[in-house]
Every structure is written in structure tokens, then in C-alpha cells.
Amino acid sequence: MMQDHFLADILTNRNNCAILDRWNALALPDGWLVAGCLFQTIWNKQAGRAPEADIKDYDLFYYNADDLREVGERNVQERVDEVLADLGVTIEISNQARVHL
């Protein structure tokens, strides 16, 4: 199945794998690992490169309409940075409920 193949491919990236292994500790409401860290991993695999090659950041989206404050999003970023600090990669957090602000 295509979904299983996609999941297996993105998990070849040790950072994607670590982020997903710690997902519950991140406690992101309606959270998603998204964007370049996924598609770049696939392109890298297709090109025979290291899965983590040229990935500038790892994007995490979540949806929390109950806290649209910028400081709320910063607090989530700090918590996520603590949980994933040992990876040594840039993690960017975005509350999709406040992107229109």
C-alpha cells in the first residue's frame, strides 16, 4: 500500500523517526509533522543520498483555537525544543489556528 511505503521511507530519516517516537511527549493538539522534512527525505532516498541531506528544518503544525497568543506558540516551541534538543536540528512550530493573524 502506498501509505505504508511512504511511512517506511520517511522513517529512514533518523530525525523524523525520533520526532515521531517522542510524539506523545510533544503533546501537540491535532499535531502534524509536515513539509520539507518529509518530501526531501523521499527525494534524497530516490537520489541515493542520506535521508537527512539538505533538510534545513523540521516543521510541526498543531491546531489550538483556544490559545491564539504569540506567547502561547512560543511556549509550545520551547517545550518542543526541550524534548528534541539532542537531535541538533531546527524545529519550527506553527499553530495553524493563528496563521491568519
Image (tube, helix red, strand yellow):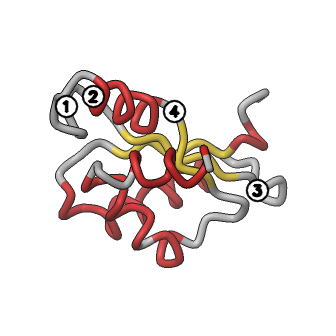
The reply to whether the C-beta atoms of the residues labelled 2 and 3 are less than 8 Å apart is no
Question: Tag 3, which secondary structure?
Answer: loop
Q: Nearer the viewer, residue 98 or 96?
A: 96
Image quarter of residue 50? top left
Q: Which mark's residue is nearer the viewer, 2 or 3?
A: 2
Query: Mark 1 and 2 residues: CB-CB less than 8 Å, in contact?
Result: yes
Near-viewer residue (15 or 62): 15
As measured in the structure, the alpha-carbon distance from the residue carrying label 1 to the one carrying label 4 is 15 Å
Residue sitting at 18 percent across and 64 percent down? 86
Residue occupied by mark 3 = 64
Q: Label 1 crowding class (10 Å Cα cut-off): few <14, some 14-19, many 20+?
A: some
Residue 71 vs 82, above or below: the answer is: above
Q: Secondary structure at mark 2?
A: helix
- The residue pinned by badge 1 equals 53
The disc label shown at residue 2, or none: none
Q: Nearer the viewer, mark 1 or mark 2?
A: 2
Q: Amino acid at mark 1?
A: Ala
Whichever of labels 2 and 3 marks the residue nearer the N terminus, that label is 2
Percent of width and height locating residue 53:
19, 31
Left or right placement of residue 82 versus residue 61 in this view: left
Q: Position of residue 51 (x, y in %)?
A: 24, 39
